[in-house]
Protein backbone atom coordinates (compact mmCIF):
# COMPACT_ATOMS: atom_id res chain seq x y z
CA UNK A 1 0.00 0.00 0.00
CA UNK A 2 2.87 2.39 0.67
CA UNK A 3 4.06 2.08 -2.93
CA UNK A 4 0.63 3.01 -4.23
CA UNK A 5 0.51 6.11 -2.01
CA UNK A 6 4.02 7.01 -3.15
CA UNK A 7 3.11 6.67 -6.83
CA UNK A 8 -0.02 8.77 -6.45
CA UNK A 9 1.98 11.52 -4.74
CA UNK A 10 4.87 11.30 -7.20
CA UNK A 11 3.17 10.96 -10.56
CA UNK A 12 0.24 13.31 -10.04
CA UNK A 13 -2.00 13.23 -13.12
CA UNK A 14 -0.24 10.07 -14.36
CA UNK A 15 -0.81 8.12 -11.15
CA UNK A 16 -3.54 5.91 -12.66
CA UNK A 17 -1.07 4.57 -15.21
CA UNK A 18 1.62 4.11 -12.56
CA UNK A 19 -0.63 2.20 -10.17
CA UNK A 20 -2.07 0.11 -13.00
CA UNK A 21 1.42 -0.83 -14.14
CA UNK A 22 2.39 -1.67 -10.58
CA UNK A 23 -0.64 -3.94 -10.18
CA UNK A 24 0.01 -5.68 -13.49
CA UNK A 25 3.67 -6.29 -12.68
CA UNK A 26 2.89 -7.53 -9.17
CA UNK A 27 0.22 -9.97 -10.39
CA UNK A 28 2.35 -11.17 -13.30
CA UNK A 29 5.36 -11.84 -11.08
CA UNK A 30 3.19 -13.66 -8.52
CA UNK A 31 1.86 -15.90 -11.29
CA UNK A 32 5.36 -16.62 -12.57
CA UNK A 33 6.55 -17.45 -9.03
CA UNK A 34 3.84 -20.09 -8.73
CA UNK A 35 5.22 -21.80 -11.84
CA UNK A 36 8.87 -22.06 -10.77
CA UNK A 37 8.68 -22.36 -6.98
CA UNK A 38 7.63 -26.02 -6.65
CA UNK A 39 10.21 -27.43 -9.11
CA UNK A 40 12.83 -25.14 -7.61
CA UNK A 41 12.38 -26.70 -4.16
CA UNK A 42 11.66 -30.27 -5.32
CA UNK A 43 14.52 -30.86 -7.79
CA UNK A 44 17.51 -30.15 -5.56
CA UNK A 45 19.33 -32.87 -3.58
CA UNK A 46 17.26 -34.10 -0.65
CA UNK A 47 19.48 -33.21 2.30
CA UNK A 48 19.56 -29.57 1.14
CA UNK A 49 16.20 -29.23 -0.59
CA UNK A 50 15.16 -26.39 1.72
CA UNK A 51 18.42 -24.62 2.54
CA UNK A 52 19.86 -24.07 -0.96
CA UNK A 53 16.75 -22.71 -2.67
CA UNK A 54 16.00 -20.43 0.28
CA UNK A 55 19.57 -19.14 0.29
CA UNK A 56 19.42 -18.50 -3.46
CA UNK A 57 16.15 -16.58 -3.06
CA UNK A 58 17.64 -14.55 -0.19
CA UNK A 59 20.65 -13.63 -2.34
CA UNK A 60 18.39 -12.61 -5.23
CA UNK A 61 16.30 -10.52 -2.81
CA UNK A 62 19.43 -8.70 -1.63
CA UNK A 63 20.54 -8.04 -5.21
CA UNK A 64 17.10 -6.71 -6.15
CA UNK A 65 17.08 -4.43 -3.09
CA UNK A 66 20.36 -2.68 -3.97
CA UNK A 67 18.86 -0.45 -6.72
CA UNK A 68 16.23 0.80 -4.27
CA UNK A 69 18.94 2.24 -2.04
CA UNK A 70 20.80 3.66 -5.04
CA UNK A 71 17.65 5.48 -6.14
CA UNK A 72 17.14 6.71 -2.57
CA UNK A 73 20.66 8.13 -2.31
CA UNK A 74 20.96 9.40 -5.88
CA UNK A 75 17.28 10.32 -6.33
CA UNK A 76 17.64 14.12 -6.36
CA UNK A 77 20.43 13.96 -8.97
CA UNK A 78 18.44 11.54 -11.12
CA UNK A 79 15.33 13.75 -10.93
CA UNK A 80 17.34 16.84 -11.87
CA UNK A 81 18.37 15.13 -15.13
CA UNK A 82 14.88 13.82 -15.90
CA UNK A 83 12.74 16.07 -18.10
CA UNK A 84 9.61 14.22 -16.95
CA UNK A 85 10.42 14.75 -13.25
CA UNK A 86 11.16 18.43 -13.89
CA UNK A 87 7.81 18.83 -15.67
CA UNK A 88 5.93 17.21 -12.79
CA UNK A 89 7.75 19.36 -10.23
CA UNK A 90 7.03 22.59 -12.11
CA UNK A 91 3.35 21.63 -12.51
CA UNK A 92 3.12 20.90 -8.79
CA UNK A 93 4.75 24.24 -7.92
CA UNK A 94 2.41 26.08 -10.30
CA UNK A 95 -0.59 24.51 -8.59
CA UNK A 96 0.74 25.42 -5.14
CA UNK A 97 1.66 21.85 -4.27
CA UNK A 98 3.97 20.64 -1.55
CA UNK A 99 7.70 21.16 -2.09
CA UNK A 100 9.80 18.05 -2.66
CA UNK A 101 12.59 16.98 -0.34
CA UNK A 102 15.21 18.34 -2.76
CA UNK A 103 13.45 21.72 -2.93
CA UNK A 104 13.29 21.86 0.89
CA UNK A 105 17.01 21.16 1.10
CA UNK A 106 17.77 23.85 -1.50
CA UNK A 107 15.67 26.33 0.49
CA UNK A 108 17.52 25.49 3.70
CA UNK A 109 14.65 23.75 5.53
CA UNK A 110 15.77 20.85 7.68
CA UNK A 111 12.68 19.92 9.71
CA UNK A 112 9.35 18.53 8.52
CA UNK A 113 7.01 21.07 10.05
Image: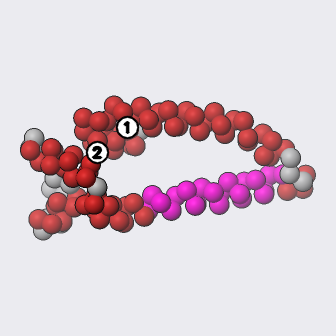
Q: Which residues are magenta?
A: 49-69
- Judge from the rendering whether residue 111 lies leftward or rightward of residue 1; answer left or right: left
Q: Is residue 92 magenta?
A: no
- Judge from the rendering whether residue 20 lies leftward or rightward of residue 49; answer left or right: left
Residue 5 appears in which quarter of the rendering? top left
Report whether residue 73 is seen: yes
Q: Give the total of numbered labels.
A: 2
Q: Is residue 57 magenta?
A: yes
Cα distance between the residues tagged 2 and 1: 10 Å
Q: Which residue does the image show at 19% across and 57% down from the upper left?
A: 112
Q: Residue 26, how many percent across, how many down?
A: 52, 37
Q: How is the image coloured?
A: secondary structure
Give the quarter of the figure containing the C terminus.
bottom left
Q: Which residue does the image show at 72% across and 54% down from the upper left?
A: 54
For marks 2 and 1 on the same chain, the one whose residue lies earlier in the sequence: 2
SS class, disc 1: helix
Report whether residue 98 is seen: no
Tell me if residue 55 comes above or below residue 36 in the rendering: below
Determine which of the numbered discs, if any, sits on residue 90 in the image: none
Label 2 environment density (alpha carbons within 10 Å; few <14, some 14–19, many ≥20): some
Circles 2 and 1, Cβ within 8 Å, touching? The answer is yes
Q: Which residue does the image show at 78% across and 57% down from the upper left?
A: 52
Residue at numbered disc 1 = 18
Tell me if residue 110 comes above or below residue 44 in the rendering: below
| Magenta portion: prevailing SS class | helix
Residue at numbered disc 2 = 10
Amino acid sequence: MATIDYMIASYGPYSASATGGNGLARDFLAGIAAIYSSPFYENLPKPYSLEYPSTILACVAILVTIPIYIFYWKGPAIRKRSKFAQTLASDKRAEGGIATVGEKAEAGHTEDA
